[in-house]
Amino acid sequence: MSEEAVQLSLPGFEQAHGGWRAEYSRQIGTDRVVKNRSGIEIKPLYTPRDWNGDAFLENLGFPGQYPYTRGIYPTMHRGRTWTQRQLIGLGTPEDYNKRVRVILDAGATAISLLPCNSGFRGVDCDAVDPLLLGTCGTVINTTDHMDRALDTVPLGKISTAMNDPSPFTLLAFLLAVAKRRGIPWTSITGTSNQSDYISHFIANHMFYRLSLSGARRVLLDHIEFCRKHVPGWNPVSVVGQHMQQAGATPVETMAFTISTALQYAQDCIDRGMDIDHVLRRFTFFFDISISFFEEVAKFRAGRRIWARLARERLGAKDPGSWRFKFHGQTSGVDLTVQQPLNNIARVAVQAMAGIMSGLQSLHTDAYDEAITTPTEETARIAVATQNILREEAHLCDVIDPLGGSYYVETLTDQMEQEMLALIGKIDDAGGMYKAAEAGLIQAMIGQSALAFQEKVESGEEKVIGVNCYQADNVAPAGRPTERPDFERMQRHVASFVAYKAERSQADVRRALDVLKRAAGSERENIYERIVEAAEVGVTHGEIVNLLREELGFGHPLVVV
Amino acid sequence: MTVSKLDPPARVLVTKIGLDGHDRGSRIVAAFLRDAGMEVIYTPPWQSIPAVVKLAMEEDVDVIGISSLATDHLIVPKLVDALRSAGLGHIGLIVGGIVPDDERPALLHAGVSAIFGPGSPRDEIIAHVAALAAKVREIKNAEFREIAQ
């Protein structure tokens, strides 16, 4: 707002502002420069001079209205609160089933599944050191395993989120189980929430299995397959989490994530898909750091940018395509091993940032996440944190409660500008696929990670218990670390090996041949063949291995 | 800061074994060891134990740093055994990342010289690696003199 305008609408503003400024300077002396994690300088006070609501309808509008800055639905959390989706997965399918039943008995309507690290690497349980099995997720390599993991789970009634990178074998096993149980695929709902292969190539290397071009094709086949056969499934979740965890700033993270979404959307358009069919099922997944106001501005700006790009650049006409639906996970990077109980406070602040940003689904980290895989007790506290914020702190009473804050609106605008500049830079590089292939994104993230680390080490960025307020005598939690029962796991591996020997080898060979042919022909849908293979007992490792041979092994590009 | 006084400089292999791919920590540690004057050999994640042993031998490293953020530390004792079988038992070994308290003794007992958790000061890591490398170099030199005589 111009000086004149402020003077006109707020008589006496200049004088009062000048008076405060003089008194502030007198008392504070030499002021320090404050910058947020994205490098934006933060002033000590924001006023109508910074933001005055001039472009209210254009830039903010109302919840459920374009450009959705204030939220994607008219009622937001006042109508329906976010989904509490805690990530679980440990041990054998039976171990998982035990845990999931407890969660469902407690009233959960959504579950998630995290596979074992061996699964993430694309191999079966008999191909790795048994000591490493099931320590971070569940060992699920076949349709039978999935059947046991989901025993008594009412598929078709609850939503399942699968941490299931390309080529999406977990969903294939799930669909095979549904068929066995006579549950129509049209009733299956949930999300392939690790479908963003570009984010794996760049930042979460553990999930990266197929070559870039191979993963690109499989994702498109997966999207087409789901649209045709599993319409309630979200085949695409664009993941900002990995990049922020790897060190990207909040501004970089949002820009990279939106550029990735633009890439996938454009790929679908180029395939001839109807953009409105595709975008309606796009979801996003982010880290929520403890940089509170910055996170709120990140999500508000991201929502606005996405709505405008989806409509104006991608040409989507359905408002459902413009809505930026996102799941947030409180960031494990901010948690400390030192004085671990402090992490409960950190998670609460991170969760508040996510809730006040209007997220659709939330995972709160357990306080021992920085040390180990959460136990039942620490996971319970993580869920209770969400309940406390909702029920006791009343965070759901008002929609977009920070909207209209001079600070938050100014920061939202500033971060939006920076994000748009970065998105433009990626456009200039030929889009996200090419920018990632060239290592451009990795280099930026690496620099940001190093810069942040240096700030922590110099003490400029304070971390309680790490570079300040250290305490010598804080006893660690003292509980023995929970590991999967080793003998049970060995039996699981032995039964898997026996299963492989006993199944119909002819069926397996035929399914793999068909899959191989599909991989070699652009006219066939690979994912259809993956699901068929799962149905006749082909294993996760066999499917990934074949596709690695046919479409190229996924080597992430590491830029040091 | 430059602390490595060895000539030629300490040679450090920074790597990850097992299944985990979180490499933010290993990249940062590799960068500051290099900036401290050491020669750093850095690998992508998911190295097999035999591959690490082979690389350590070929590169004649003084210290191996294993980064583990998702339970890969559980197989570090197997790496120690493999190094010893290959006649490389003198190489110093440190582990960085997340190792639960109750699982630390097993690693230290196996021969890991130090475990650096998240938030460990860089100077502490650099000083430890430099001292460890100096010790290893002495052993190597003594062996070399023995062979030469």
Image (spheres, coloured by chain):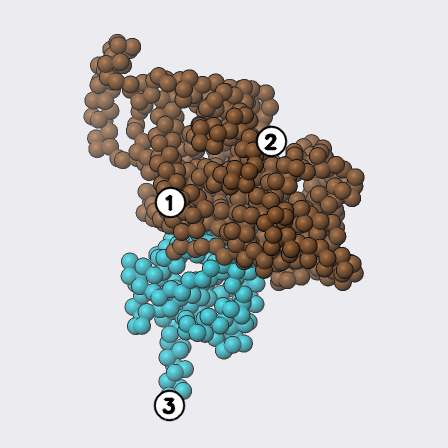
Q: Tell me the SS state at disc 2.
A: strand
Q: Earlier in the sequence, mark 2 or mark 1?
A: 2
* Residue A476 rendering spot, x and y as whole percentages: 52, 48
Q: Amino acid at mark 1?
A: Ala
Residue drawn at x 41%, y 82% is: B143
Kindly report the distance in space between the C-alpha atoms of the residues bearing marks 3 and 1. Answer: 61 Å
Mark 2 = which residue?
A: A83
Contact flag, marks 3 and 1 (Cβ < 8 Å): no
Letter of the chain that mark 2 sits on in the rendering = A
Report whether residue A451 is seen. yes
The residue that label 3 is drawn on is: B149
Q: Where does the image place residue A549, in percent across and percent down from the top left?
A: 58, 60
**What is the display colour for chain A?**
brown
Q: Residue at x 50, y 57 (%)?
A: A555
For disc 3, the chain is B
Q: Are marks 3 and 1 on the same chain?
A: no
Q: Are marks 2 and 3 in contact (CB under 8 Å)?
A: no
**Mark linked to residue A453:** none
- Quickly name the residue at label 1: A429
Dot 2: within a 10 Å radius of its alpha carbon, few (fewer than 14), some, or many (20 or more) residues?
Answer: some
CA distance separating discs 2 and 3? 73 Å
Identify the hue of chain B. Answer: cyan
Residue at point 54%, 33% (across, down): A275
Compare residues B26 and B144 and report the one nearer the observer: B26
Q: Which residue is depicted at the point 47% across and 22% down?
A: A66
Q: Closer to the camera, A294 or A19? A: A294
Mark-to-mark CA distance, 2 and 1 = 37 Å
Q: Secondary structure at mark 3?
A: loop
- Tell me the element at label 1: loop
